[in-house]
Image (spheres, helix red, strand yellow):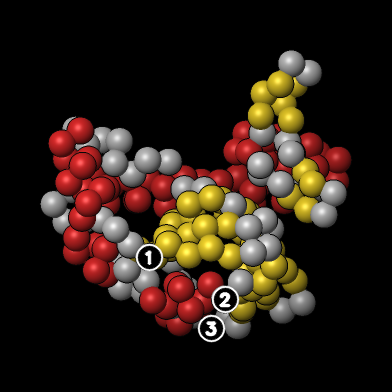
Amino acid sequence: MELLEELDPGERADARATLTTVVFGTDAGHIPISEWLEAARSGPGVLVLDGVLAAGVHVGDRIAAELVGAGDVLQPWRREDEELLACGVEWRALVPSRLALLDNAFAQRAVPWPQITGALLRRAGRRTRRLNLQRAISSQPRLEVRLALLLWHLAARWGRVEPGGIRLPLARDGFDPG
């Protein structure tokens, strides 16, 4: 998850000293992420450092969920993105989580290191690919196929290889990415 891995050691030290930003934590439950996203509106967004969040997107009487976790970059929804369709987004932390505010001031401080912007763009691209995969999974007509595919998808992201196979840590009261 290291944003600085493409920099040489000297550049890394300089970038670490320059690119400090606000980091905030949240307990499991509903989170007021819209406030944090608004604060990052003119920058890259909010970076999930650790934990797992669920975004519930409401359209009419339907809800679609997206799971995001460490390394994902979140941006605010803009009015013009929603066009004529009324929708809402509700965020929940499934476990205690930490996030970093990547606002315009952060973006300005990162200018000397374009590799960091490139790394953030690659993360946004990975999130889009995972969301498209999730959409394809949810369109499978058979429930048992959807469940198997979803578990494989989650295992690829958060699973741990153990002697008996891949373990996807699930806590009794919810997801536990450990």
Kindly identify which residue carries mark 1: 22
Quadrant in which the N terminus is drawn: top left
Question: Which residue appears farthest toward the top when viewing the image?
Answer: 163
Whether residue 125 sits left or right of residue 98 in the image: it is left
Which residue is at a point 86% across and 40% down the rendered structure image? 144
Q: Mark 1 or mark 3: which is in front?
A: 1
| Residue 32 marker | 2
Q: Mark 2 or mark 3: which is in front?
A: 2
Which quadrant would residue 95 be assigned to in this image?
A: bottom right
Q: CA distance from mark 2 to mark 1?
A: 16 Å
Position of residue 160 measured from the top left corner of the image (x, y, whole percent): 66, 29
Whether residue 176 sits left or right of residue 2 in the image: it is right
| Kind of residue at disc 3 | Leu
Q: Are marks 1 and 3 in contact (CB under 8 Å)?
A: no
Q: Residues within 10 Å of mark 1 (few under 14, many from 20)?
A: few
Which residue is at a point 64% across and 48% down the rendered structure image? 134
Whether residue 83 sits left or right of residue 157 in the image: it is left
| Kind of residue at disc 1 | Val
Q: Secondary structure at mark 1?
A: loop
Q: Mark 2 or mark 1: which is in front?
A: 1
Q: Nearer the viewer, residue 20 or 29?
A: 20
Which residue is at a point 74% across and 30% down the rendered structure image? 167
Q: Earlier in the sequence, mark 2 or mark 3?
A: 2
| Kind of residue at disc 2 | Pro
